[in-house]
Amino acid sequence: MKIQSRIIRIILACCLTLVYGCEDWLDVSPSSTLKKEDLFQTQQGFQDVLHGVYIGLQDNRLYGRELTFGFLDVLAQYYTNIPGTPQHRYAQHHRYQYDASGVKNMIDNIWHAMYNNIANCNLLLDNIDEVDREIFSDRVYAMTKGEALALRAFMHFDLLRLFAPPYSEEVKNLPAIPYVDRFINSRTPFSTMEEVCQRIAQDLEEARELLRAYDPIGPESEEADHLTLFPRRAHFNYYAATLLLARLSLYKGDYSQALSYVNELTTEHALMKWQPISTLAMLRHIFRLHFRSTDYRSAVTDVYFDPESAHENFYLTVSVERMLEIYDIGSGGSSDSRYIQWFSRTDFNYIQKTHNMDGPPVLRAEEVYLIGAEAALNTSPPLARSYLNSLRNFRNLDNLSPGANISDEILKEYRKEFIGEGQLFHFYKRHGVQFIPGWGSALGEAQYVFPIPVSELEFNPINGHE
């Protein structure tokens, strides 16, 4: 991965930037910067860098928009108003026109923004064991390093899911993406899918070992006060790393390992850690982003979901017909809490799931049950049904009948659960779904695999070939 050569300066106002400059929300004066050798003299300096990584994830090019309710949910064909709006922001995106300039720029920006934030993680990790260990308390050292490792793994995994084909025996040893684990001003060769997966797992397991003894959302903490635990969910905590390992195992088809992580995530102790603080949205966050300096709704989501303020070329709606189909209203789905709470249910039907959030969810407990159901499907259909029923009961739905098609029901629950969060496209891709609701043509590798930016390949050819 290319890292441009320039003097490294760290932003102390509310985040840092290393390569591609500041976004509009960041107002920085020259006096608010320090050289890295000055910053890494204190425990607080490392925490400031880590905070900057979280701020980087909020970037609209990443989880602030495109990797949640924006680009990825457009590709999943959730929104029904785009085809009838020729000048819509996502008019070419929803048709998978990755060679169109606007779409190409968006994909390139995802790649560059993600690797820029990975560089921030690496800057921290490269220095944390090089400075005087006495500047840290044991807790801050373990938490800071553990979170940075987990975040690096998390970002590489999403790059892999976007820019490589679905994992399989046929392609696992082919070059996929660079796994960048050092802050260096030179290229990092592409690693194979298998190598990337191994590196992700290594970083996550090391993160869990560091976080285990100190994390309030971890197995050795008896903290049960949700007002105390809720802020910790805005950090990549122990159980977030465990859920990501479960997701990785499912991605690779290692179902027994996935179930092992699911078992850890569904103990009574773990379940205590992520009960919802409010019944309004009923989202059991394990890891979420928290917009500290601005209101997530007014600054981000209302531009797309509020009929009073959204421009028609930005507005994203889900037709009443599509909503009724997704939530099985004709088959008892009218009691589904998601259907009741997450939509305006008006003629201009829009998502109001985000209205009372201060940032997007990234990893949720609901996915644990879906991973468990899919991982148990072939070896224990009753266990798979039990996991699905746990999720359905939480959503105020009855148990599935013994004859229900579990595979079909898993897909239905992904469509219901993750609207506005960017996960359905990944599900379709992982399963190679050719025909998805809302799109009439078959999907294949050309639609499911993002093209790697030309600027990257010019600097860093795959296996020496441009």
Image: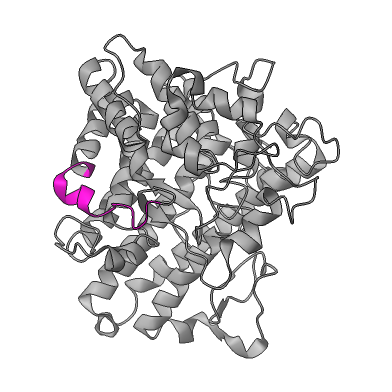
Q: Return the x and y of residue 403 as percentages of the image width and height.
A: 30, 8
Q: Work out whether 65 lies above or below 255.
A: below
Using the image as rendered, state which of residue 37 and residue 186 is in the foreground: 37
Q: Work out whether 10 lies above or below 380.
A: below
| Relative horizontal placement of residue 274, taking residue 440 as reference (left or right) | left
Q: Is residue 272 magenta?
A: yes
Residue 14 in sight: yes
Q: Is residue 72 magenta?
A: no
Q: Return the x and y of residue 183 as percentages of the image width and height.
A: 49, 63
Q: Work out whether 316 lies above or below 412.
A: below
Residue at image point 55% right, 43% down:
420
Q: Return the x and y of residue 272 as percentages of the image width and height.
A: 21, 52
| Relative horizontal placement of residue 32, taking residue 392 as reference (left or right) | right
Q: Return the x and y of residue 258 as percentages of the image width and height.
A: 27, 33
The outermost residue toward the bottom is 31
The image quarter containing residue 60 is bottom right
**Helix, strand or loop: magenta stretch:** loop
Residue at image point 58% right, 55% down:
64
Residue 458 in sight: no
Using the image as rendered, state which of residue 67 and residue 327 is in the foreground: 327
Q: Which residues are magenta?
A: 265-279
Q: How many marks?
A: 0
The outermost residue toward the top is 403
Colouring convention used in this rendered image of the protein? one colour
Give the quarter of the figure containing the C terminus. top right
Residue at image point 66% right, 79% down:
27
